[in-house]
């Protein structure tokens, strides 16, 4: 007799490729991370977001084995991140990174490929990062955006299992940024675990399967982009109105009011009620847009970054 669906065991979650478990890290008397946990799973892009000084860089440095926690555990592929097995499974693009100015793009890539047991082909890396036409140009002669693309190529050249991308699209034009986004999605589709830190909240919304919002070394909220955005009940109303901000803040269920170019943005739990109150007070009310809160709205509401 076959087991019913109710009797079948739930499928086990895949083992994490990297994680921090109840980690605390101090700089002097200040706790950069306070009992902080983070799990990176195969096939997922995880965005670690937070205001400056929230602990994001410390978390990345711990996972790279560049420092040790005061308390807690750090694992990459179930090993100490400082082990050779873990190091060859990691690729990293850090915000503050550089390369020798005198080496060409091809020379840089071939040098980094030599550090890994099964690297990607140089030609493939040049093609994927749009650097084929620049392969003989020295790093010192590249533009800021071109340097970012080369650093991204170095991060993925070893075909790593875990990829850390710290502000990967700073200085890139819109078209190149979208190309990098496509490559990040391809990494996840190939079963890699990607940790993304970015100040571009649109980027996190577009790429992340899961967002971890951190402030003062602790997790404030974690979930999918949809869950994070819907964790604040307020919706946004954008309109042109002659009513002053003070009058708008006094309307029922309004939580925040902001000026936006020639209009106002009003955040409210009950937008229909707000509009019913506004219409008799301002016959010039126009250009109405009502929408769900954005990731930026949620970020500001859940942290002290407003």
Image (cartoon, rainbow, N blue to C red):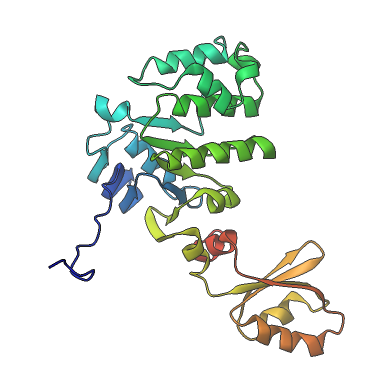
Q: For the point 55% across and 54% down, which residue is it?
A: 205
137 to 50, vertically: above or below? above
In x, y percent, where is residue 236? Answer: 65, 71
Among the 4 quarters of the image, the one containing residue 83? top left
Q: For the point 63% across and 86% down, which residue is it?
A: 252
Image side of residue 163 versus residue 291, left or right: left
Among the 4 quarters of the image, the one containing residue 92? top left
Q: For the point 24% across and 55% down, which residue is it?
A: 12
In x, y percent, where is residue 42? Answer: 35, 44
Q: Quadrant of the C terminus?
A: bottom right
Image side of residue 233 versus residue 114, left or right: right
125 to 286, vertically: above or below? above
151 to 229, vertically: above or below? above
- The reply to whether residue 251 is in sight is no
In x, y percent, where is residue 166? Answer: 49, 38
Q: How many marks?
A: 0
The residue closer to the viewer here, 163 or 71, is 163
Image side of residue 56 versus residue 175, left or right: left
Q: Outermost residue, left direction?
A: 1
254 to 91, vertically: above or below? below
Q: Quadrant of the N terminus?
A: bottom left
- The reply to whether residue 155 is in sight is yes
Q: Outermost residue, right direction?
A: 284
Image side of residue 161 versus residue 48, left or right: left
In x, y percent, where is residue 186? Answer: 49, 39
The residue closer to the viewer here, 49 or 155, is 155
């Amino acid at each position: 007799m076959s087991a019913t669906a109710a009797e079948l065991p739930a499928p086990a979650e895949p083992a994490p490729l990297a994680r921090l478990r109840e980690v605390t890290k101090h700089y002097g008397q200040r706790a950069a991370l306070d009992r902080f946990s983070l799990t990176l799973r195969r096939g997922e892009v995880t965005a670690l977001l937070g205001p400056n000084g929230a602990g994001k860089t410390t978390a990345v440095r711990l996972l790279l084995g560049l420092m040790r926690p005061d308390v807690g555990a750090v694992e990459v592929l179930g090993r100490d991140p400082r082990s050779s097995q873990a190091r060859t499974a990691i690729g990293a693009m850090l915000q503050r990174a550089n390369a020798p100015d005198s080496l060409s793009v091809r020379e840089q890539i071939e040098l980094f490929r030599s550090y890994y047991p099964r690297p990607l082909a140089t030609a493939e890396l040049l093609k994927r990062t749009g650097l084929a036409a620049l392969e003989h140009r020295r790093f010192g002669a590249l533009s800021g955006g071109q340097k970012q693309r080369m650093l991204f190529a170095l991060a993925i050249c070893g075909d790593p299992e875990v990829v850390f991308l710290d502000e990967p699209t700073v200085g890139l034009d819109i078209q190149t940024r979208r190309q990098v986004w496509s490559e990040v999605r391809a990494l996840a589709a190939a079963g890699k675990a990607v940790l993304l830190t970015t100040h571009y909240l649109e980027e996190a919304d577009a790429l992340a399967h899961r967002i971890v919002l951190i402030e003062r070394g602790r997790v404030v909220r974690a979930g999918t982009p949809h869950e994070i955005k819907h964790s604040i009940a307020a919706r946004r109303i954008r309109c042109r109105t002659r009513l002053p901000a003070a009058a708008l803040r006094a309307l029922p269920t309004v939580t925040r009011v902001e000026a936006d170019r020639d209009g106002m943005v009003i955040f409210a739990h009950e937008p229909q009620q707000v509009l019913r109150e506004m219409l008799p007070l301002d016959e010039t009310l126009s250009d109405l847009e009502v929408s769900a809160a954005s990731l930026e709205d949620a970020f500001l509401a859940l942290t002290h970054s407003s």
